[in-house]
Amino acid sequence: MYRQQIPVVTAEEAAEMIQHGQTVAFSGFTPAGAAKAVPKALAKKAKQMHDRGEPFQIRVLTGASTGKLDDILAEANAISWRAPYQSSRPLRAQINAQKVQFADLHLSHLPQMVLFGFFGEIDVAVIEASELTPDGRLYLTSSIGASPTFLQYADKIIVELNHYHSPRLYEMADITILPPPPHRSPIPIYHPLDKVGLPFVQVDMKKVVAVVENNEPDGIAPLEEPDRVSQRIADHVLKFLCAERRAGRIPREFLPLQAGVGNIANAVMACLGENPDIPQFTMYSEVFQDSLVELMERGKLIGASTCSLTVSDENLQHIYHNMDFFAPRIVLRPQEISNNPGVIRRLGVIAMNTALEVDLSGHANSTHVLGTNLMNGIGGSGDFTRNAYLSIFMTPSTARGGRISSIVPMVTHADHNEHSVHVVVTEHGLADLRGLGPAERARRIIDHCAHPAYRDYLRHYLKTAPLGHISQNLEKCFELHNNLIKTGMMLPDLDLRVFQETTERATPAPTREEERMVK
């Protein structure tokens, strides 16, 4: 029906509507729901213009990471500025070489920043949808992200109409755009499945300049099977949550869970789903991952609020073929709502996220290697960490075969400070930091989370550091990192063969009971 009002064009024709230097907002929260056809055409256009010696780069906004969208635009040298989050290898290299300027932002902040023009005007929004009606109702696909805000404030709109997605996704969608402060009321979400908005975005049809049709999947690959380290981390988290529930610090009916993206989070959710001591539970999170599909079908996960269906193509098709079951149990929201601090605090969400490194004070670095090189970005972890009922950070104790310790005297970049981090977990154990002073926090992190090969160094550091409320030696706090830069190892005299033997002794094979809980 949109054909009566809006020209249907090729992706190449749509790309010609986007000019060098413009700010372009794309749909996508992870690869789920990301624009697909137009970014490819833009990359082709950029290469052609560069070959002719002409400039072509754009400023790119999305909801979060986008997968192929970032890859192909970065490989074509078509990005000059990017926000708020990415996970692309080629784009990461350009950001770290300062060839692309990157603004690393809390995801819940992005829509308001767009609303008030913090990034200037949005020239064009390229948004994937499953349907566009003549009266301007736009139905989004497998993610909501920041697309509703982009659609409202962009000068021009290009719609990618993707016929791959189920037209029934609107049954999950709950879309609302918050008015500007100080005219906001409390968001009336009192249960993860509460709906407060509409199943579509109302757009101004005068701004829609083109429709591009395609039939392309999101292209999300299945996550790897949990390795031994991830399973041990999951086991520690499970035991902790069970103990908290027995002690009455988690209600008998449990609390909504949030889990970050990746294999460790997937392992934790699978582990929680198998344990009989964990009751049926809900999630108030930003992504819905592969492990949750089976948990929901088994009746362990009874409802999930999310921003995107970040599942493999196979699992997404399974959901689409069983919408009668999944649609009433999943709510897709804009990231301003899925990551909203007030709702997170009200619901008492238990947040579980991963870190690159954690220091002896409990600060967590989740974004920058050696304090300089960006990995992905802070994403939504800060939204949940600061406002969660319980904030849990998980990380393997070492990396690169023992050459790097994830537990260090001081993190080289602090994304989450000691006041927000309640629990730290590695494969070696769990440190509950609630209510502890700095000295006891440090000892508990060393004793429970550090790899045994690094504990003597960390204890000596703590013992010899100048006294104060926090014991910290400013001359030596980055000694491990400097060693890594100079020698390729944080402990240059560490025998990696002995390290491996120590690792095997410190992380024994799971018992039969643990295997039952994890598998």
Image (spheres, grey):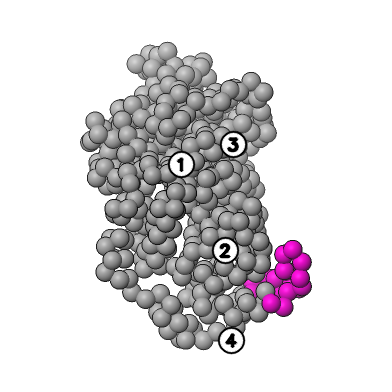
Residue in front for this viewpoint, 349 or 167: 349
* Residue position marked by numbered label 4 in the rendering: 493
Q: Are marks 3 and 4 in contact (CB under 8 Å)?
A: no
Say which quadrant the N terminus sits in. top left
Q: Position of residue 303 (x, y in %)?
A: 35, 37
- Magenta part of the chain: 463-481
**Which of the two marks, 3 or 1, is nearer to us in this view?**
1
Image quarter of residue 280: top left
Q: CA distance from mark 3 to mark 4?
A: 46 Å
Crowd class of label 3 (few under 14; some 14 to 19; many from 20; radius 10 Å): many
Q: Which mark is residue 110?
A: 3
Identified at 40% across, 53% down, the residue is 246
* Residue position marked by numbered label 1 in the rendering: 286
Mark 3 / mark 1, whichever is N-terminal: 3
Q: CA distance from mark 1 to mark 2?
A: 23 Å
Q: Position of residue 95 (x, y in %)?
A: 61, 53
